[in-house]
Image: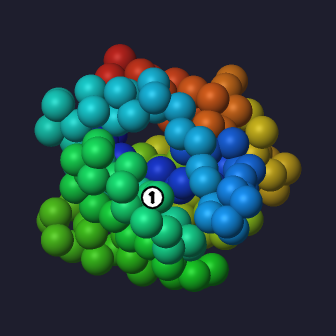
Amino acid sequence: MEIKLFLTDVDGTLTDGGMYYSADGDVLKRFYVRDGMGMKLLQQTGVKIGFITSETTRIVEARAKKLGLDFLCQGIRFGGKVEAVQKICDQLKITFDNVAYIGDDVNDIELLQAVGFAACPADAAPEVMSLPNIHVMSHNGGAGAVRELTDLILKGC
């Protein structure tokens, strides 16, 4: 299986899932820098990279811009991730077999079941961790799970 597209959920996968609020009510998210480096290394091999998330925030947009992502899909509601990824696959002229995806919660299950390489952080929801053919990372979301997966892909799975 050749991975041509790497996608990740954001909250609980690229972040620890916590929502941090400032005194002014601003929401903050913490990203793990090594996850970003892993995605950049993967991108340098020609793999397209993207975020797919149900939230819509400027924070995620800023992180995507900093990393130079190929795709940013925000505001994808429950059940809509497969359709969003199908559009990307059509654009790239690839199939779901060429897609690696890492997600952590029940809204990721449908896409995790559709892709060629499915993974989740060590602290994912039990329903995700019990999926057949799921690769459970040894690191938690926001603490290196994405880097662990990008390293696996770079080594040829």
Residue 131 in the image: x percent, y percent?
72, 51
128 relative to 117, above or below: below
Residue 39 in the image: x percent, y percent?
34, 35
Residue 94 in the image: x percent, y percent?
22, 60
Q: Is residue 123 left or right of residue 144?
A: right
Q: Residue furthest top?
A: 155
6 and 96: which is toward the camera: 6
On the question of residue 36 being in view, the answer is yes
116 relative to 108, above or below: above
Picture residue at 22% right of the left edge, 37% below the top:
43
Q: Is residue 61 left or right of residue 41?
A: right
Please tell me in which quadrant of the rendered image residue 85 appears: bottom left
96 and 45: which is toward the camera: 45
Q: What residue type is disc 1 on?
A: Val
Picture residue at 35% right of the left edge, 27% below the top:
37
Please tell me in which quadrant of the rendered image residue 34 appears: top left
In the structure shown, which secondary structural element does the residue marked by tag 1 occupy? helix
Q: Which residue is mark 1?
A: 60
How packed mark 1 is, by other alpha carbons closer than 10 Å (few <14, some 14-19, many 20 or more), is many
